[in-house]
Image: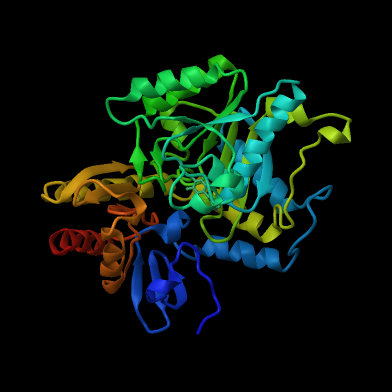
Amino acid sequence: MSAVWHPFTQHGLGEPIPLVSHAEGAAIFTVDGRRIVDAISSWWVTTHGHRHPRIVAAMREQAERLDQIIFAGWTHEPAEELARGLRAIMPDALTRVFYSDSGSTAVEVALKMALGYWQARGEARHRILVLEHGYHGDTIGAMSVGQRGVFNRAYAPLLFDVATIPFPAGGREQATLDALARACADPHAAAFIVEPLVLGAGGMLMYPPAVLAAMRAICADAGLLFISDEVMTGWGRTGTLLAGEQAGIVPDILCLSKGLTGGAVPLAVTMASEAVWDAHFDADRARMFFHSSSYTANPLACAAAVANLAIWREEPVRERIATLAARQAVRVAALADHPRVTGVRTLGTIAALEIGGGGDGYLAALGPRLLAFFRERDLLLRPLGNTVYVMPPYCIGEDDLDRIYAAIFEACDAL
Ligand SMILES: *Cc1c(COP(=O)(O)O)cnc(C)c1O
């Protein structure tokens, strides 16, 4: 009997929990000899594939030199090199790099930076604007700016109030923009946090770049800070390095994690504009940015991220993403004709659809049956309710893609 308490797992259902021994590329291997296709990049983190040789080598070399060092008032070469690399590849206006260790923490840091910015300017702005169906992590602050529901009902009394802007569903984009403009007029409004182009945990809900650009412009006009949570969308997921690129937007604050190390080890950054930095820059210690975690900028993690940047510079990553996107588009298009399939959509390396029509949300009865169905076929797919999505590592081969889509087709018929 294992003592391990797993995340987002109802142990009372007695579902099998496979014991994994190793992984390679787009495949995961279990101790009992099964080869599982990782169709969701180990929960959206693995970009180039498991155990990319350059990332493994970078961590190994770093481990020989420096494992961990306090980052308040100290620094090290992997952190400096990574910050230089991020400055070179990310939008110019994001001049500052703050390290942390998960997507949730990157969001907490972004929210704290936004409030610090307004406090320094002597304005009582503390209200955060959020998008309906958003997801930004599972810590209290991150849950507060995310969709309320069964995930956080028990904690609702602790979550702070936000202003929720309706999701820009097809045909209702103007209502979203109008609601945002109204919310921006609130004298307490501080910042708007969004997942650009695709709301991941909310059900792979997609909206067009023009809406993102319009939302960014409304915030700029109102002088509000715009926080782009690219924890999932960053590092090529949507076809471009950042999803924001497709809308030509640059946020005031950018959250990155998941693919930052290629998905090998935990690391996050919150990048900020010079204005946000300036608000905290002072000779007065009371105005410094009060945030840290013990493992801030862990050297092994930074070395992995430096290797990820080198892969982006020196390997044909964009071509791999384009190839994967094209291969997925063909396969989902074939599924679109199935009478039980609705809502087929793709964006870059992400493909999503609903089986059996509209949903009871995350706890839809079909979800666990789909999960088991795919597990029995040696596929790591983890539907969100009756929303099935595929988000593989960029190195996945055609045979593995065929297996994934054949199983989805089969599931449509069988369940
Ligand atoms: C996964 C995710 C997070 C949280 O990241 P963790 O590393 O799991 O804490 C935040 N925002 C978005 C958009 C995510 O997809």
- How many discs mark residues in the rendered view? 0
Residue at (16, 63) in percent of width and height = 410
Among the 4 quarters of the image, the one containing residue 60? bottom right
Q: Which residue is drawn at 28% across and 29% down?
A: 170
Relative to 117, residue 270 above or below: below
Q: In which quarter of the image is residue 372?
A: bottom left
- As displayed, is residue 64 above or below residue 70? below
Which quadrant of the rendered structure holds the C terminus?
bottom left
Residue 85: in sight, yes or no? no
Residue at 46% across, 64% down = 50
State the image coordinates of residue 271 (x, y, percent, origin top left).
63, 37
* Residue 350 in picture, x, y percent from top left: 34, 47
Name the one closer to the observer, 262 or 413. 413
Position of residue 265 relative to residue 239, above or below, is below
Which is more toward the observer, 369 or 204?
369
Q: Which residue is found at the position 50% from the left and 42% from the top? A: 146
Answer yes or no: is residue 245 visible.
yes
Does residue 347 appear to the left or right of 142 in the view shown?
left
- Work out whether 300 lies above or below 138: below
From the viewer's side, name the closer residue of 193 and 183. Answer: 183
Q: Nearer the viewer, residue 246 or 252?
A: 252
Whole-percent x and y of residue 246?
Answer: 41, 31
The colour scheme used to paint the residues is rainbow
- Residue 412 position within the rendered picture, expressed as x and y whole percent measured from the top left: 17, 58
